[in-house]
Amino acid sequence: AERRRQAAAEAAAEERKKREEQRRAEAALKAEQAADLKAKREEMAAMKQGAHAALKAATANFHKAINAESDYKEKWKQIVSMRDSAKHLGNATVKAQHATRMKFSVMMVCEMRLKLRDDKPEEETFRDIVHEALEVEWQVLSKSRGELQELSQQGDECRQEMLHCEAMLVTGPSRENVKARQKVTASLPQLATRSLYAAPSIEELLAKSYELVEKAAKITEDAEVAVLRTDDDCAKAGAHTTACFDKRKTQTDTHRKNLEKVKKEAKATISDAEKRLSMLTMRAHKTPETPRSAAETQAQVQAAEDFINQLKVGKRRIETDYRLKTSSFRIDKSCRELTKVRAGTHVSSLHPITLGSSQSSPNLTGG
């Protein structure tokens, strides 16, 4: 019975040992399977993460390419816009410069007219409607030329800025490539590196290009408007000067004719008075007279001679006035008929102009 009990105990122990080994084997298998499953899950997660990163990188590269293409199109759109604006601005600047040169010849005519009028006799040198009209015309011409020259200068400066901005936009990719290479090498000189990083970015250049196009459009419009307006103002001033010359010419010519008529009447009066004096003198010599009548006759002769002398003085004054009016008339006529070709020999003194110190031609630049 004891042996059976011991055998049963050994059999039970053996059975427990087998079950324990089987349990351990199952646990090891489960642990191995769990490790394999975990490794496969980690591998799959890593694959998913790599695919996501690749997708993200591909998406970023796609957006980068789209943005680069958009920037490229915008850059060349602005370059073309600046070229068109520079073309229109150049045409407007040329028109303004041409108008400035044309007004310079008219200004020389105005200056020479004022100088010719300074050569009038001193008695005829005074301010009249012609002189005031010439001064106004000169001031209009000077102001118009100054405005047009300023617009031309602004246009040239704006065109130079657009050319520089265009060159910077075109060479932008090259600068970016140099910057990229400079990050991986230290072989670039320090001065070149500083100047490279001091250059504006593409975004700043594009913003600058929009400003320049808008500025060029404004200068172009201002220049075209200024050319038309200054032409109209100068034409009105010139027409007013011509009308004043014609009016002055008519007045002087009328005065000359009146003086000529008075001069003829004075001549005839003097001739008649001299004849009467001669007859009176002959009668006094031929007719016997008493001392009293002789004294009266002598008094009459003396009065007649005084009257004739007064007439001659008046006649000389009229002749002098006639000569002065004739000289003034001829000068105004030559001024009225003065052309740009003749005025081209005149040396202008526009910076500043000083036309003399006489009363009829003051310094036009004075306060």
Image (tube, rainbow, N blue to C red):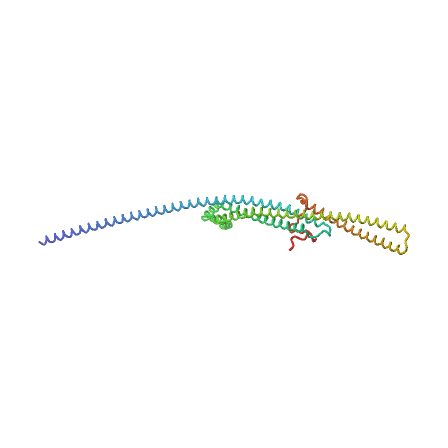
Q: Determine whether, in the image, residue 153 is placed left or right of residue 128.
A: left
- Tell me where residue 189 appears, x and y as whole percent: 50, 49
- Tell me where residue 240 appears, x and y as whole percent: 64, 48
- Tell me where residue 230 appears, x and y as whole percent: 59, 48
Q: Nearer the viewer, residue 45 or 358?
A: 358
Q: Looking at the figure, which quarter contains the C terminus? A: bottom right
Q: Nearer the viewer, residue 76 or 289?
A: 289
Q: Nearer the viewer, residue 78 or 334?
A: 334
Q: Nearer the viewer, residue 192 or 71?
A: 71
Q: Determine whether, in the image, residue 272 is placed left or right of residue 337.
A: right
Q: Determine whether, in the image, residue 338 is placed left or right of residue 172.
A: right
- Tell me where residue 273 appears, x and y as whole percent: 82, 50
Residue that lies at the very extreme toward the bottom in this rendered image = 292
Count of marks placed on residues: 0
Q: Determine whether, in the image, residue 156 is placed left or right of residue 287.
A: left
